[in-house]
Amino acid sequence: MTMSFSPRATVDALAPAMRRAAEIARDLEGRVANRPKAGERSPVKAALTAADTAVQETLLRALLEIAPSLALEAEEDTPSVAAFASEGEARVVVDPIDGTLRFFLEALGPYSILMGLAVRDVYQVAHVALPREGVFIDAVRGEGARMASGEAAPVRAEVRVDGSRVLISHDLPGAAVEVLLEAGLSVAPASGGAISVAPLLPGVCGGLRFMPGGSVSVRGRIGALASREAGARVCGADGSPFPEDICAPRSTLLVAADDETLATLREAAVAAQRA
């Protein structure tokens, strides 16, 4: 498939829909109940609310207006999904609310809205919204990342060493948490999408996503493009670059503002793997 539009044009065209989706999610916080999906292995995977479906439909309707020929990989089965192909060289990946149970319903940390455009299994475009924090991040491969807060226009995002907070997976083993605390860092649980852009956020120097016995999902890698484009270290547990191929299995994603933070995250990742 040959794209008839530019990645930058796609980012700009979808930005208003991301803002509308974030407004919907915020409006529905505390007003919707969990309607668990059948057949999922865990309560986290099964969690579903009216917010998930409303947000996804907002994004898909906007996508249909600008790029109806793209393939789609969507988290939820909403009405507009049927209008897209399920396979193709270029596909949009959507997670309407990443962290529905722990972070949207239980409010343990930032949840996220994720949308990425992958071509031949490599992300070219990333959109990440943190509705509760009012943060919007987008990126185009090779063209940098941008960030906006509230109603402000987006500005170029560049990673700076700012603060000592690390966003971590909700179930990161205690041994790994101890490594971070002993290094003088503070920790806070967050959705995978928030973790993937952690070094871009005020007061946050890194993020550690750990999926014991599994792999960081295709959706959970969307924000890694933005972190890379902003100059962050984006690595696996061994310190090697996290794979660009969105299907390459990896159980650990580390994102850091500087080499010192990355070294500490690697120590914590080793402790997590041994736990």
Image (cartoon, helix red, strand yellow):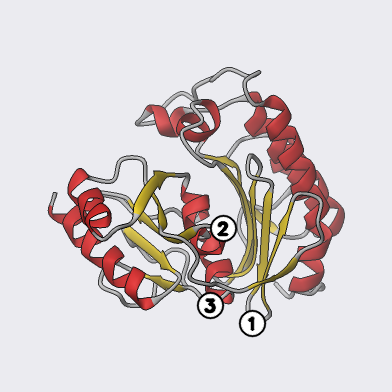
Q: Nearer the observer, disc 1 or disc 3?
A: 3
> In the drawing, does residue 217 fall left or right of residue 8?
left
Q: Is residue 138 above or below residue 120?
A: above
Q: Amino acid at mark 2?
A: Pro
Instruction: Please state which amino acid type lies under the numbered disc 1.
Output: Gly
**Residue at image coords 53%, 60%:** 197
Instruction: Please say if the residues under marks 2 and 1 sit with CB atoms less than 8 Å apart.
Output: no
Q: Quadrant of residue 48?
A: top right
- Badge 1: how crowded within 10 Å, few (<14), some, or many (20+)? few
Which residue ends up furthest to the bottom in the rendered image? 142
Determine whether, in the image, residue 130 is placed left or right of residue 267: right
Relative to the observer, which residue lies in front, 115 or 102?
102
* Residue 221 image point, x, y percent: 49, 60
- Residue pointed to by mark 2: 202
Residue wearing tag 3: 231
Q: Nearer the viewer, mark 2 or mark 1?
A: 2
Disc 2 and disc 3: Cα gap in Å?
A: 15 Å
The image shows residue 118 at horizontal and vertical percentages of: 60, 66
Quarter holding the N terminus is bottom right
Amino acid type, mark 3: Gly
Residue 37 image point, x, y percent? 49, 25
Secondary structure, mark 3, is loop
Residue at 56%, 58% (x, y): give it: 201
Of 18 and 231, which appears nearest the observer? 231
38 relative position to 95: left or right: left
The residues tagged by marks 1 and 3 sit, at their Cα atoms, a distance apart of 11 Å
Q: Is residue 150 left or right of residue 122?
A: right
Q: Is residue 252 visible?
A: yes
Residue position for label 1: 142
